[in-house]
Image (cartoon, rainbow, N blue to C red):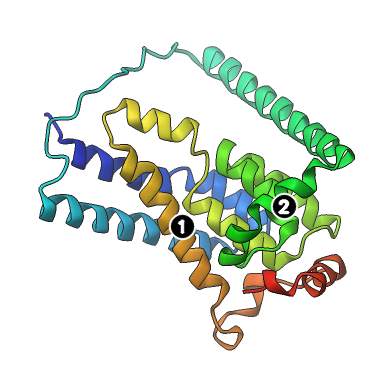
Amino acid sequence: MSLSVAQVTVLGVLMLVGHSLPVEGAVAKRAGVPWWVTVALRLGGALVLGGILHWVYSTGGLLQETAEIAWRPTAAPEGVLAWGVAQLRTLSLIYLIILGLMVLLAVLRHLGLERLIHFALTPLLRVLGIGRSAANTTVIGFTLGLSYGAGLLIRDVDTGVMSRRDSFLAICFLGLCHSVIEDTLLILLLGADLTGVLWARLLFACLVIAVLSRWPDGWRPARWGGRVSEQGRSDRVRHPGMEG
């Protein structure tokens, strides 16, 4: 059965936003985002964004040509042993990547380049209502994946570097739009269009988090943001413009 580029793009958006919920939902829970928020945000976001793209493509007659698959997966090795070896290899790679990211952040902080990153991201973070303390980990999660970014967010929250409010908003943003390099390339190889799987997803995530950060406190459950650490509170006092 052949699919159009529009259909593959919509399916790709559904997968990009709503995939791997058991694993990434557990990571988000550890970072302070309740399960029900993750499920509602990501499944709801996937359906809403997918519906919007479907309406735009079908109404405008866009991307109706047949999609061409540029990559087909090879057969995976069979057997429990082969599966176990593959999982161990993946876990080892994740450990090395996270270790490398932590070293990189320490080097950037030592060289003073961390401030430049914060300065460059200040306009976007202000729109999203996220504090500067979440800049580094948000960029890492955005480019490499939710698990990598969330691991660093958990560390920063536990050590008091980042407030739970910033962690909550950053995790919600990453839930809607993360791993834009690897995941986006994979879906593009299946025949999707870049405007839907990247730009529309990024714009949708920014709009949702901008609204969520400005949600009236009286209507927002207290456990969404958790308690604010002293460091996070002082960070927002020094930078009042970063508050939503």
Q: Which residue is mark 1?
A: 205
Location of residue 222 by image quarter? bottom right
Residue found farthest to the right: 110
In the figure, is residue 169 to the left or right of 77?
A: right
Percent of width and height locating residue 139 = 63, 45
Q: Amino acid at mark 1?
A: Ala
Q: Which residue is mark 2?
A: 118
* Total numbered badges shown on the rendered structure: 2
Q: Secondary structure at mark 2?
A: helix
Q: Nearer the viewer, residue 50 or 132?
A: 132
Picture residue at 15% right of the left edge, 36% below the top? 4
- Which secondary structure, mark 1? helix
Q: Can you give x and y, in whole percent of width and height, for residue 12 in the image?
A: 32, 40
* Residue displayed at 42% across by 14% down: 76
Q: Residue at x 61, y 23 (%)?
A: 90
Please tell me which residue lies in front, 219 or 113: 113
Asked if residue 181 lies left or right of residue 164, the reply is left
Quick check: 207 above or below 142? below
Residue 42 visible (yes or no): no
Occupied quadrant, residue 230: bottom right
Three-letter code, disc 2 = His
- Quadrant where the C terminus sits is bottom right
Where is residue 134 drawn, in percent x and y?
70, 55
Query: How far is disc 1 from disc 2 in space, using C-alphas?
Result: 20 Å
Disc 1 versus disc 2: nearer the observer: 2
